[in-house]
Amino acid sequence: MKKPSSFGRKVLKAAGLILAVIIIASVFYGFTSGWKRLVVKEQIISDSRLQAEFDNFKIVQISDLHLNSFNKCPQCVSRIVDSVNAQNPDLIVFTGDLVSRQSEELAPFADILSRLKARYGVISVLGNHDYAIYGPLRKNPSSVVKDKNKLVEMERSMGWQVLLNESIIIGDSISNLAIAGVENEGKLGRLHLADLDKAMEGVPSDCFTILLSHDPWFWRHKVLGKTTIPLTLSGHTHGGHFRIGKFSFARWMVGPYWGGLYKEGNQQLFVSTGIGGMIRFRLGAWPEIDVITLKR
């Protein structure tokens, strides 16, 4: 095999140096600014089964705040709230992981988050990190349960409606929309708390239902093909904190449903890549607010 010429070696060396600089600069940006680069994404979700009253119904989805990551940037949370309210949503949904280790992480931000406003309020479910199983309480089962209950009460004191295998009906007796929420269940971990049958109790069969499930794994294994629920909203993946085009490490970590809209048959799943995380780093998979408009 012919060796590169002296000029060729210089070109390769220069190219390698440029690539290294780009990588270092990108990683530096991800750690210093990328995790605060909030973007608003718009998504239209169409379904002919949607009742006419809810055509153009606007839902803002936020997910995976992991509030401890904003301890040194409370103004970042204020900016999130202002950005959500600026969308003038009909409904705000939060799809889990408000905290990372325990409920006390919410306390400094409770007043800020209570400013979230929508016509039908804020509805939330719990994510795996909301059960205090990763923090200092994890070895004490009774403390874990108490802390989870405390978090739920704190959310409710902010005016949020927390669904624990429950549902809420929006609308009148003729046209209505159901929001159902299950507790966390996924492929990994020891949380298998979802009870979909219980969550769907009392939901009319002709009601268009939106299911909130923190982990998109639940849709693939417990909703798709096993129910008639037309739309599920999830989070959990963070987009792997890194994305280039359609590539993300999340594809290897959590499977094929890691960010965006997916459709199989007449059922759809939307996965938000969320806002915060266990590490203050994002590159490409920027922190996102998702504005979902329902269409007939």
Image: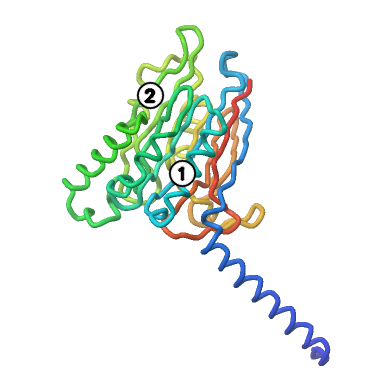
Residue 264 horizontal/vertical position (percent): 59, 34
| Relative to 75, residue 183 above or below | above
The residue located at (26%, 42%) in the rendering is: 148
Mark 2 and mark 1: span between their CA atoms?
29 Å
Q: Which mark is residue 167?
A: 2
The residue located at (40%, 50%) in the rendering is: 66
The 10 Å Cα crowd at callout 1, few under 14, some 14 to 19, many 20 or more, is some
* Residue type highlighted by circle 1: Ser
| Relative to 294, residue 42 above or below | below
Residue at mark 1: 78
Residue 283 horizontal/vertical position (percent): 58, 59
Quarter assignment of residue 251: bottom right
User: SS class of the residue under badge 1?
Assistant: helix
* Residue type highlighted by circle 2: Ser
| Relative to 7, residue 240 above or below | above
Residue 280 horizontal/vertical position (percent): 46, 59
Most foreground residue, 267 or 287: 287
* Figure quadrant of the N terminus: bottom right
